[in-house]
Each structure stands twice: as structure tokens, then as C-alpha cells.
Image (cartoon, rainbow, N blue to C red):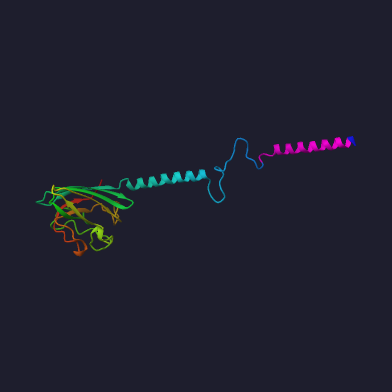
Amino acid sequence: MKDLTTLTSLAIVCGLLAGCDEKQERPYGDASPVGSPTTDVDKPREGGPSAIEKDKMAHEEKHEHADQAALVRDGREAEADIEPAKGMKLKGEVDLEETSDGVEIEVEIKDASPGMHGFHIHEKGDCSDLPGESMGAHFNPDGKAHMLPHEGDARHLGDLGNIEVGDDGKGEAKFTVKGANLQEGHSHSLLGRSFVVHERKDLGQERQPAGDSGAPIACGVIKKD
């Protein structure tokens, strides 16, 4: 009986040792390898990326958007020098920049008569004969009616409204021309067009086809900056 008990004990011990050896020999099993621990953050979740992968994707997307914005701005600026018609003194400068909203325009004029003056983009970049309208009509690639900016968006692309000039002869204004761009050769590009300042106030849609703002008194061709 004693010998049977001893043999049984030895068999149990050997079985346990064999199990231990099997676990040690198994490469990894369900556990992670030594030196390569995993966490819930690292492990990809079923049906989606891990938190680390999401952070990386967000970082890359942010830089991609920044690069795209830089491409839009790069080389997409223009300017115009406003020169007076014969017998006038008015001068000015215009800066243009293409943005995701269209083209932003900043204009400053001086030596103009006080009051409101119609200010438009005309279809041709030719200021050689303003009385003869060498600059053509308002820039209107979509065939819209004339309006002031506050009267609606379905207007000439060149309808900028008015510039108000103070008693000191100076005036400044900012505009955003939606739907326009500064891409060479594009049908809606402002490059190669001209800015024209008129002698009177633009009266808007009640006076077709161009607002009845009087004679052109200054002009400037839009050129790539």
C-alpha cells in the first residue's frame, strides 16, 4: 500500500512538471511575448482603428488641409494701380487675394470728390480710352442682371457697389467676390480685367443695365502680383 501511494504521488508530481514544461515551451499562447506588452490603447478595436492610429490620422489630416490652403494662396494674389482719366486727379491701389470664399479685394483711393462713387470690375483690361469704354462692360460671365451687393448674389460678378469718399478726398473699402478666382485663363478669373471708378453713386437694380453711376473717372488693370 505504501508503495502504491508513493507511485501515485510521483505520477501527480510528474504530471504537474510536464504541464509546466508545456507552458514554458509554448511560444506565447494567449499571453503577450516578454518585452512586448500591449495595452487597450495600442490594440486595434474591432471595426475601427486604435486611439493611437486615430491621433496619427487626425494629425496627418490637419497638415493636409494646411498644405491645401497654402496651395490656394500660393501665387493667387493680384494688384491694380488706379489711374485717373484725363482731367482727373483720382488715384488708388487695389490688392486681391484668392481664398476659399472667392476673391478678397481691398481698395484705397485718394484725391477723389467727396461722396459715393460706383466701383466695378469691367471685362477688359484696357484703360486707354475710358470715354470710349475701352474697358468694356461690367464683368458678367454668367449673364446676370445688375445689382448692388446687398441686393442679391445673382448679379454681375463685377458689381462691387460703391466706395464712399470723405471730405479729405480719401476712400477705402473691402469686398469679397464669391465665385471669382485668380486662375489664369479661367472664365471667372479677375486677372486681365479692370477696376473702374465712376463719377456718381451706383443706384443698383433700379437702374439697368449698369446702375447709372455716370462716366468712368479712373481705371486700373488687374495684374498678377
Q: x, y (%) of residue 113? A: 12, 51
Q: x, y (%) of residue 218? A: 15, 52
- State the quadrant of the N terminus: top right
Residue 141 or 196: which is nearer the viewer? 196
Q: Name the side, left or right, on which 183 lies relative to 64.
A: left
Residue 156 or 51: which is nearer the viewer? 51
Report if residue 125 is visible in the image.
Answer: no
Q: Is residue 11 magenta?
A: yes
Q: Which residues are magenta?
A: 3-28
Q: Residue furthest left?
A: 87
Write the residue at 85% across / 36% down. 7
- State the quadrant of the C terminus: top left
Whether 5 is drawn above or below 58: the answer is above
Magenta residues: mostly which secondary structure?
A: helix
Q: Is residue 215 magenta?
A: no
Q: How many marks?
A: 0
Q: x, y (%) of residue 60? A: 44, 44
Write the residue at 48% across / 44% down. 55
Quarter-of-image position of residue 116:
bottom left
Q: x, y (%) of residue 213? A: 16, 59
Whether 76 is drawn above or below 138: the answer is above
Q: Residue furthest right?
A: 1
Report if residue 97 is visible in the image.
Answer: yes
Q: Name the side, left or right, on which 16 lies relative to 127.
A: right
